[in-house]
């Protein structure tokens, strides 16, 4: 793809935030901005490509990680368990994704493994450390406990 240079002026706090976010994703600020623009173009055109990995890839991940997701006692324990198996969690919009620890490429959403972000938040009693969508925690963690417990697929599944 032919690339051209575009300069933009940013307030210092936005420049720092851009570099921080790009660093967290292990990419350059330019790559990060290009991905944001592509994502916005897809959203506006309504032609969002599917990001669900093939089931043949999910099956082995589910077999390898689901016990850790099911038995972790908190976010720190879950991250330790996943790191010991070469994976890590990252925020993705209003949910979480699983990434390879080496290389950082995206493997799947946590909900692809049968665990929604909202379910994990309720179980651990707090949002994922550093997750920027704090309002999700307020909604999920303050939901009334009356009636049956929410299960994956219920109203909070949309946050993944």
Image (spheres, rainbow, N blue to C red):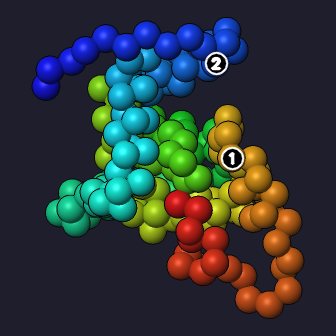
Q: Which mark is residue 14?
A: 2
Q: Residue at x 37, y 14 (%)?
A: 6
Would you say 88 lies left or right of 42 here? right
Q: Residue at x 31, y 35 (%)?
A: 105
Q: Which mark is residue 133?
A: 1
Q: Residues within 10 Å of mark 1 (few under 14, many from 20)?
A: some
Residue 40, horizontal then vertical, whole percent:
43, 45
State the residue in front, 53 or 59: 53
Residue 55, horizontal then vertical, whole percent:
22, 66
Q: Is residue 148 visible?
A: yes
- Which is more foreground, mark 1 or mark 2? 2
Furthest-left residue in view? Answer: 1
Q: Residue at x 67, y 40 (%)?
A: 132
Asked where in the image residue 137 lies, by quadrant, the reply is: bottom right
State the residue in front, 37 or 108: 37
Q: Is residue 70 visible?
A: no
Residue 110, horizontal then vertical, whole percent:
46, 56
146 is higher (above) or lower (below) than 96: below
């Amino acid at each position: 793809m032919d690339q051209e240079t575009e300069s933009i002026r940013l307030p210092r706090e936005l420049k720092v935030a851009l570099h921080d976010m790009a660093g967290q994703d292990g990419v350059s600020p330019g790559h990060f901005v290009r991905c944001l623009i592509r994502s916005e173009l897809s959203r506006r055109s309504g032609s969002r490509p599917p990001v669900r990995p093939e089931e043949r890839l999910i099956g082995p991940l589910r077999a390898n990680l689901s016990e850790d997701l099911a038995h972790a006692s908190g976010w720190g324990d879950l991250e330790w368990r996943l790191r010991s198996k070469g994976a890590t969690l990252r925020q993705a919009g209003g949910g979480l994704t699983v990434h390879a620890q080496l290389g950082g490429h995206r493997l799947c959403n946590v909900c692809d493994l049968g665990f929604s972000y909202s379910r994990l938040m309720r179980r651990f009693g707090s949002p994922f450390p550093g997750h920027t969508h704090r309002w999700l925690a307020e909604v999920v963690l303050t939901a009334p406990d009356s009636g049956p417990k929410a299960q994956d697929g219920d109203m909070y599944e949309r946050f993944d």
